[in-house]
Image: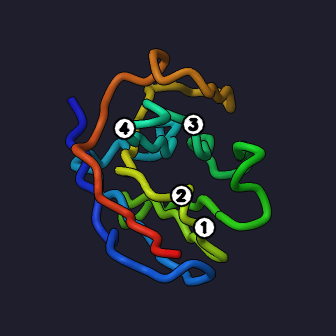
Amino acid sequence: QVLLVESGGGLVQAGGSLNLSCAASTRAFSTYAMAWFRQSPGMGREFVASISWSGLETNYADSVKGRFTISRDNVKTTLYLRMSNLRAEDTAVYLCAAKLTRTGVLSVNPGWYDFWGQGTQVTVSS
């Protein structure tokens, strides 16, 4: 069982930046693929970015590529999302997710992931 806790959300102006964190409760963090999803009333749950257990493989939604960067620290057992040039349509609750794997496989399907955090609110004003 893995407990995930997101932090770093807030209110920013369009064009601004935010950094999100997801702290994991397990020392086996390096055996999990990780991902960020976001959820809003109009869009439902949407894939944002993912990263393999080693950090060598990453994947991004087209809507955020070039603006967001996913990374992880396997010593601190923490997942990060650096967000720049934010837009009003980025407004959502951002959730982190984890999947046990010993390969570099990644998925954009939320049903593939085993564990979820409660989310942190990001609001972008225009």
Calculate the distance from the C-alpha at mark 2 to the C-alpha at mark 4.
Answer: 12 Å
In front: 44, or 68? 44
Q: Quadrant of residue 84?
A: bottom right
Q: Position of residue 45 (x, y in %)?
A: 45, 31
Disc 2: which residue: 90
Dot 1: within a 10 Å radius of its alpha carbon, few (fewer than 14), some, or many (20 or more) residues? some
Dot 4: within a 10 Å radius of its alpha carbon, few (fewer than 14), some, or many (20 or more) residues? few
Disc 3: which residue: 47
For the residues labelled 1 and 2, say whether their Cβ atoms are less than 8 Å apart: yes
In front: 122, or 49? 122
Calculate the distance from the C-alpha at mark 2 to the C-alpha at mark 3.
Answer: 12 Å
Calculate the distance from the C-alpha at mark 1 to the C-alpha at mark 2.
Answer: 5 Å
Q: Position of residue 93 (x, y in %)?
A: 35, 50
Disc 4: which residue: 41
Disc 1: which residue: 87
Q: Residue at x 57, y 27 (%)?
A: 102
95 sits left or right of 48 in the view: left
Front disc: 1 or 3: 1
In front: 120, or 22? 120
Front disc: 2 or 4: 4
Calculate the distance from the C-alpha at mark 1 to the C-alpha at mark 3.
Answer: 16 Å
Vertical side of 43 occupied by 19: above or below: below
Q: Residue at x 56, y 42 (%)?
A: 53
- State how the image is colored: rainbow
Front disc: 4 or 3: 4
Which of the marked residues, 1 or 4, is nearer the chain's N terminus? 4
Quick one: SS at disc 2? helix
38 sits left or right of 47 in the view: left
**Amino acid, disc 3:** Phe
**Amino acid, disc 4:** Pro
**Amino acid, disc 2:** Asp
